């Protein structure tokens, strides 16, 4: 007598089609049971493919680079190309005549992308304005990934989350570079004198300026005492500046919803570290020092603070 529970023989062969029919009749219930089966039960070596949710519908945490990002960048590139093409066809480039070695133009201006450096030469020694400051800019840009430890704002930018970074960029790029280019182009005339818009560029205009070094203004007459005094002033500026910068970071409140550090400024300093904090503070205070030096020149006609036979600042 055959065992009714056996899968072999005639009864087993008849039960197989009936089980398949029951599974088909189950419909979605059978499919749900199969999908609920653990994936670990798959045979060894078999590749399991998990479907990826298609981006573009609703709000997702991540989107595919293609086509969403690439499409937007392409459309923006086309729009900028059209604007530049129309601009170049309707406005003539401000080009002058061929160079003449027997006639020097007044004022003699560098190309527009170097006018910022030429403007800083009015306030600083050439080695400092043409070598040191641009080197600080390049090194600072290279150190941004090392100095910036704020995980918020990666891939997007909001003013509340990136207040310090955005303001620093606007100060360093828009003011210290773009504004100097605008000044050199439209406000500097013959003799590199200042001319307001609408004012005639008189080549015979001579501004009577008496620039004096800060040590000389305070009574120092020899190089040694002037150099020592200048070093003390610059050192005091950096000490006070670093102290104020530390106080500002330390005073950031705790539990700020827009900050990635719940502990406030104290936790930020701990995660930042003294090396990152010191480099950031030095670069930021040096950038502020450019404005301080320019204000001293405009207000008090102070030429240099540190005076030596070799370098001047």
Image (spheres, grey):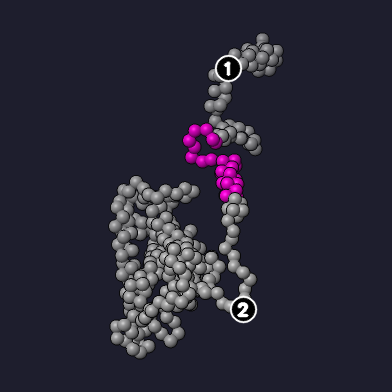
Camera-side residue: 210 or 293? 210
Asked if residue 8 is among those painted magenta in the image, a careful observer would answer no
In the shown orientation, is residue 274 left or right of residue 182?
A: left
Camera-side residue: 187 or 60? 187
Local SS, label 1? loop
Q: What secondary structure is the stretch in magenta mostly built from?
A: helix
Give the crowd class for mark 1: few <14, some 14-19, many >=20 residues within 10 Å. Answer: few
Seen in the picture, residue 19 relative to 119 is either above or below; the reply is above
Pointer 1 with pointer 2, Cβ within 8 A: no
Quadrant (top left, top right, bottom left, bottom right) of the N terminus: top right
Sequence-first disc among 1 and 2 = 1
Q: Residue at x 49, y 65 (%)?
A: 185
Q: Residue at x 37, y 88 (%)?
A: 223
Q: Which mark is residue 90?
A: none
Find disc 2 in the rendering and name its residue: 101
* 3D distance between C-alphas at marks 1 and 2: 93 Å
Local SS, label 2? loop
Q: Residue at x 43, y 51 (%)?
A: 151
Q: Position of residue 37 (x, y in %)?
A: 55, 27
In the shown orientation, is residue 64 left or right of residue 189?
A: right
In the shown orientation, is residue 251 left or right of residue 147?
A: left
Residue 207, quarter of the rendered image: bottom left
Q: Residue at x 45, y 85 (%)?
A: 310
Q: Position of residue 100 (x, y in %)?
A: 62, 76
Seen in the picture, residue 170 relative to 209 is either above or below; the reply is above
Q: Is residue 247 visible?
A: yes
Specify start and end residues of the magenta stretch as a single range: 55-83
Quadrant (top left, top right, bottom left, bottom right) of the C terminus: bottom left
Q: Is residue 177 visible?
A: no
Seen in the picture, residue 231 relative to 284 is either above or below; the reply is below
Q: Which mark is residue 27?
A: 1
* Extreme residue in the top direction: 1
């Amino acid at each position: 007598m055959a065992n009714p529970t056996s899968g072999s023989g005639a009864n087993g062969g008849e039960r197989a089609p009936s089980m398949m029919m029951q599974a088909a009749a189950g419909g979605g219930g059978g499919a749900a049971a199969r999908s609920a089966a653990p994936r670990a039960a798959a045979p060894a070596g078999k590749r399991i493919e998990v479907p990826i949710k298609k981006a573009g519908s609703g709000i997702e945490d991540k989107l595919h680079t293609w086509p969403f990002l690439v499409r937007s960048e392409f459309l923006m590139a086309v729009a900028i190309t059209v604007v530049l093409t129309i601009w170049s066809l309707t406005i003539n480039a401000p080009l002058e005549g061929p160079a003449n070695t027997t006639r020097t133009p007044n004022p003699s201006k560098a190309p527009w992308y170097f006018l910022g450096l030429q403007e800083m030469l009015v306030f600083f020694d050439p080695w400092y304005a043409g070598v040191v400051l641009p080197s600080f800019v390049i090194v600072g840009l290279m150190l941004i990934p090392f100095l910036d430890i704020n995980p918020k704002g990666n891939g997007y930018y909001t003013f509340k989350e990136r207040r310090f970074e955005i303001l620093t960029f606007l100060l360093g790029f828009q003011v210290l570079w773009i504004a100097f280019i605008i000044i050199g182009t439209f406000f500097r005339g013959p003799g590199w004198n200042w001319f307001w818009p609408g004012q005639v560029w008189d080549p015979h205009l001579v501004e009577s300026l008496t620039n004096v070094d800060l040590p000389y203004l305070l009574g120092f007459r020899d190089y040694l005492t002037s150099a020592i005094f200048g070093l003390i002033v610059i050192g005091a500026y950096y000490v006070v500046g670093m102290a104020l910068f530390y106080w500002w970071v330390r005073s950031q409140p705790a539990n700020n919803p827009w900050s990635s550090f719940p502990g406030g400024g104290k936790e930020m300093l701990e995660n930042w570290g003294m090396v990152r904090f010191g480099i950031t503070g030095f670069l930021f205070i040096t950038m502020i020092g450019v404005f301080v030096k320019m204000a001293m020149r405009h207000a008090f006609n102070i030429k240099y603070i540190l005076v030596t036979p070799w370098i001047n600042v």
